[in-house]
Image (cartoon, grey):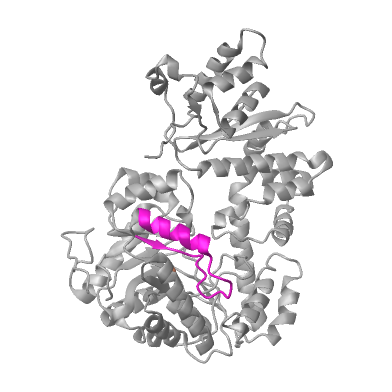
Amino acid sequence: MPRTAALGIGIGLRTRHFGELLERRARVDWFEAISENFMMDGGRPLHVLERVRRDYPVVLHGVSLSIGTTDPLDRTYLAKLRALAARFEPTWVSDHLCWTGVRGHNLHDLLPLPWTEEVLEHVAERVGRVQDALGRRLVLENVSSYLSFSDSTLSEWEFLAALAERADCDILLDVNNVYVSAFNHDFDALRFIDAMPPERVAQIHLAGHSDHGTHLLDTHDAPVASAVWDLYAHALRRLGRVPTLIEWDGDVPPLERLEAEAERAREVFASVHGAEAGAAGKAHAASSPAA
Amino acid sequence: MPRAPRLRELQHELETLLSLGGDPDCEQRLGRAAPSLPIRSDHRLDGAARLAIYAEMIFIRIRDAVTEDFPATRAAIESTTGSDAWEPLLRAYLRVHPTSDPDLRRAGRDLPAYLRAACTGPAAWIGDVAELEWALVRAFEAADAVPLAVADLEALPPEDWPALRLRAVPSLLLLEHAVPADTIHRRLVDGEPLPDPNEAGCRLRVWRQGFTVYQRRIEPIEQAALARVLHGTDFASLCEWLAERVPEGEASQTALRLLQSWLADELLAVEVREA
Ligand SMILES: [Fe+2]
């Protein structure tokens, strides 16, 4: 695992649970907050995040960095992200290996890139500038995709591993996204996971998807699929004690339902590593941050 | 010089196509464009179908975000134009105002202005409703402030009163409508019959107290006084200004009455002095 503490099992911080989180301690180790949801001047969401941050480690997860766009870097956005990170001191800051718009527009979707040397060079250079602007390492996530480009000369996993190496950034491995894309583009999910450099995988995402027959959609509105749990166990065996987060964004269920899903991840984690994943259960089996 | 010229060209082309979601001719246009794009097809889905997955998702995501912030505006459009009119209206809006903010929740920020221009004549009130709804959103996420309390003023020596700076909380917004926008808004949300459109207009203040957003009808004198507070004024200047507008001898009484209601509603903020 890279230079991050072993956080254990977390869930996404969602508006539906705000009230309950102010009332009681959740049975999870940490929270992931969507950066853009807190880029406002004031009000309740920031107040809740402050309270949550007092009690748990928090990471910031963005959706609008658009690291792969050919537009100039959005300096205003980066300044807001930097300010947010200074205020809430997240364990790390992540976003996606994708582009979200061009010509100043934002389509609010995580769009795939062609996996070529030219694009690798382009993205690596931008990651470097973003890391300079933020004054910290960036963690980038593989996205679910529904189209791929015929002029790609690399596989997505080769691209991601090479990018992490070249730009000196870390990886957020979304196991559900690997599963969804593997189905949609007909590749072997295990090859993707096995190509990940263990020392760079800072975090794992797990989420639910929906089956549309011709393709799988990354809807985040369902429990984690059983095939994805199997892939998760495989990823843990290969990559070590990687902090794991359950994402649920559509039809967000009650907090207890998410805690149960986190509990299941904890069980898989324990079955692979034979120890508690984080502090929410019993004693904190945290390992110290690596070098 | 862009470092990845081919990527740039591809992204421009894709951005245009993926913005077509919700358009009646979306499928046709994607079908025409896809064969010349470097998109892989297989036995399950061709390039156009793969583009369509994105185009549809993108439109739905933005539509849902805007709809959440404009429930009354949506009801207004549906009741005046037809039960299936909301989606085409949003499509037309997004063609003129493509989303640009990194925050999806700001996708609707230009909708009031768009409706002001699009809905004229007897439908002009729809722009008023949208303006009110967006003000409620803005107040919800405006910067926090420590409200000025009665005790703060009681602690103030009488000689300091004239120079007392009056500063509004950042969430305070003033609206002026030629129609009873507040009543229309409430009836639309509650699904009740709309008031007579010829009813008198209204002046509103919208603000956040704690984490709750409020709106209230105000008199012209209060609206003008609050406008001065938003601009920056002190207590003596406000009294002076009031003296020219209210019947003789009522200025200080009016000033006190306004001040009391502003304090009770937490409209005034403690002045933060730079250290
Ligand atoms: Fe994810």
Q: Quadrant of residue B227?
A: top right
| Side of B2 where A204 appears, left or right | left
Residue A66 within the segment the image draws in magenta:
yes
Camera-nearest residue between A153 and A208: A153
Residue lying at the far bottom in this picture: please name it: A153
Determine whether A59 is above or below B187 in the image.
Answer: below
Residue B177 within the segment the image draws in magenta:
no
| Side of B270 where B12 appears, left or right | right
The image position of residue B96, as x and y in percent, is: 73, 59
Camera-nearest residue between B81 and A35: A35
Q: Residue at x 63, y 52 (%)?
A: B108
Q: Quadrant of residue B7?
A: bottom right
Q: Which residues are drawn in magenta?
A: A59-87
Q: Quadrant of residue B98?
A: bottom right
Visible residue check, residue A142: no
The image position of residue A210, as x and y in percent, is: 50, 70
Camera-nearest residue between B85 and B252: B252
Of the four image quadrants, the one with ligand 1 is bottom left
Residue lying at the far top in this picture: please name it: B249
